[in-house]
Amino acid sequence: MTGGSGDGPARPVHELVDVMGTIVTIDIYAWRAPGPAELTALRERASRAAEILRRADAVFSTWQPASPMSRLRSGSITLRQAPAEVTDVLDRCAIARDLSGGWFDPWAMPGGTDPTGMVKGWAAQQALEALATPLACGAIVNAAGDIASAGGLGDGTPFRVGIADPADPRLLAEIVELRGAIATSGSYERGPHLIDPRSGRPATAVASASVTGPDLALADALATALALAGEAGLEFVEPLDGYEALVIGLDGARRATARFPFAPARGG
């Protein structure tokens, strides 16, 4: 998992949202201390982002039988009858399936089509877009370690986030300079939950896989694919403009694409 941010201006807005089986945090960093009216405007932005997350949860839940995604899976509605968000996400899933050589494939999941491997990242990215305002120098939506961000600290310094050490998640394996999004996938916290689309069974080839890039939806899907494909999956990330990847092997060995944004040492 990833999380955290660098030192910098105070967060005038910090909100927690309980959705999609996890806690999503919304943080807005202002250029300066906001006045009462500005603070109200920032809180309204955060509330709008929270509603986007709740809407995504309601639409894409595979646990609630009345959700549009569950009804699509059961065949009680068609894709044409589903909300527009479903078509958008499935279109993006098809792109991710092609880019990953089939290692990410929601149509190969047990129980029917399941875009869960992208939905959390997609929802967080949509929520981030609702936070855009000239009042803020930066914003972060952190969906249990999958992070969408914009801007940075007020002095131009990018946010820094940590990638947990899969051998001991209380420690950090790496620090990343975040300019956009990062997603991390692995089985070290939740156990064997990633499904190999080729066998239909739980599997993982590495301890963790992280992908950075401009869009968290795609980064989320690619991190899932990379965790299943292992080091060989770096080859499908490397050509993608703006996307970089890091894998930590089951033995602790690390391999990354050429421009993975490792943070330099403080003062270095």
Image: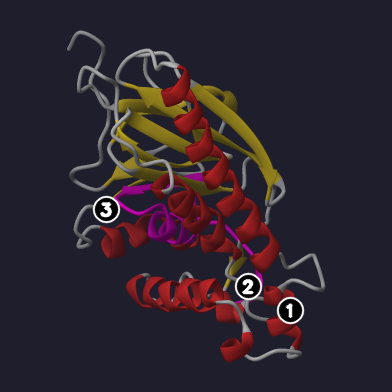
Q: Residues within 10 Å of mark 2 (few under 14, many from 20)?
A: many
Q: Which mark is residue 149?
A: none
257 shown above or below 111? above
- The one of 77 and 48 positioned closer to us in this rendering: 48
C-alpha span from label 1 to label 3 = 31 Å
Q: Position of residue 112 (x, y in %)?
A: 68, 81
Residue picked out by circle 2: 114
Question: Which residue occupies 41% across, 16% down?
Answer: 35
Residue type pointed to by label 3 = Tyr
- List the residue tagged with mark 1: 111
Q: Which residues are magenta?
A: 198-224
205 sits left or right of 94 in the view: right
SS at mark 1?
loop
In the image, 92 versus 112, the foreground residue is 92
Residue type at mark 2: give it. Answer: Asp
Residue under numbered circle 3: 243
- Secondary structure of the residue carrying tag 2 is loop
